[in-house]
Amino acid sequence: MILVVLFFVLLTASALLSAYAPRITHDGAGTAAASLLAFALFFFLVVMLTWSYFACVLLEPGKVPQGWSPFETDEADRLESGSHRQDKGLTGTGRPRYCRKCQAWKPERAHHDSMLGRCVLRMDHYCVWVANSVGLLNYKAFLLFLFYTFLACLLGASMLLGDVARFFKGIDAASPDNAGRFALTMIAFVVDLAFSLSLGGLLAMHARMVWLNYTTIEMFEKQRAAQWPYDRGARRNFEEVFGTRFWRWWVPTYTAAEKARMLDATLNGHPSSTATEFAAL
């Protein structure tokens, strides 16, 4: 899947180079400047989506520390051997949660990922496109990957639209030399348009989940709490994922202090503290 993503990026980049390189070198100063600006913006988005993509692929999504328990040692031993030794599934109930596959306790909102073979903190889903589970520590990278890819595809389709129209009007189609460029332009345009539409819908769904503080798993659970215990208002829900510093909203990584605070809030049962602690950074 990594190679597929890189292929689509290179496909659009090649089509834009073929279409815009002559304009930058041969057209008037105004047209050349506009073409160069659009071209530079596209490649900036490519850099950001590539950074976000590999951050999502390579970052640890959130590992439950070995031996972690929500109880004191003696209480954990008693409950582990008793009726609570099962996965209760529904989060927000206040019940202890035990993973039978890992044979270990897990925090609320953590789920066992069969692909990774372990539990993932605040697991959202396993994504084949990034060959990794999306969880607490790489969810922002995943969202930014979707965001920058959506913008890049939308911009790429917009930049190629004029050339597609010219080909269909017969302005450039007469020359046999243009056959290869026409095929490249059409394929890139169709791919960009299709990805723009599909990613737009996916982004809208995840924006709603961030707004309400749901994960994908929680959105599709058959049984839900009547009042969702993790919804603390749109702003604080957003800050739990992206932080409070505006300039860091756009980069797919967290500082060491941010990661430590997120892990503390998740592992030590302080779900309402994350956004507050971010503000102190």
Image (tube, rainbow, N blue to C red):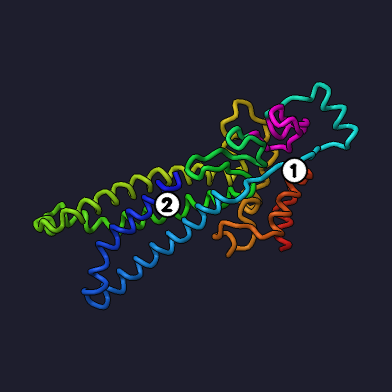
Front residue of 211 and 40: 40
Instruction: Sort mark 1 into few (<14), some (14-19) or many (20+) by Cα contacts within 10 Å.
Output: few
What is the quadrant of the C terminus in the image?
A: bottom right
| Along the viewing direction, whichever of 4 and 136 lies nearer the viewer | 4
User: x%, y% of residue 186?
Assistant: 24, 50
At horizontal 42% and vertical 48% (from top left) the residue drawn is 3
Three-letter amino acid code at disc 1?
Pro
Task: Answer above or below: position of 210 versus 37.
Answer: above
Q: Is residue 209 left or right of residue 6?
A: right
Question: Range of the magenta residues?
Answer: 90-112
Q: Position of residue 120 (x, y in %)?
A: 65, 40
Magenta span contains residue 100 = yes
Residue 80, x across and y down, in percent: 82, 27
Residue plotted at (27% across, 65% down): 20
Identify the residue under disc 1.
65
Residue 108 falls left or right of residue 33: right
Quick one: which residue is furthest to the bottom in this view? 29
- Against 26, residue 47 (above or below) is above
Residue furthest top as drawn: 83
Return the x and y of residue 121 as percentages of the image width and height.
Answer: 67, 42
Q: Is residue 245 above or below residue 118?
A: below
What number is the disc on residue 150? Answer: 2
* Callout 1: SS: loop
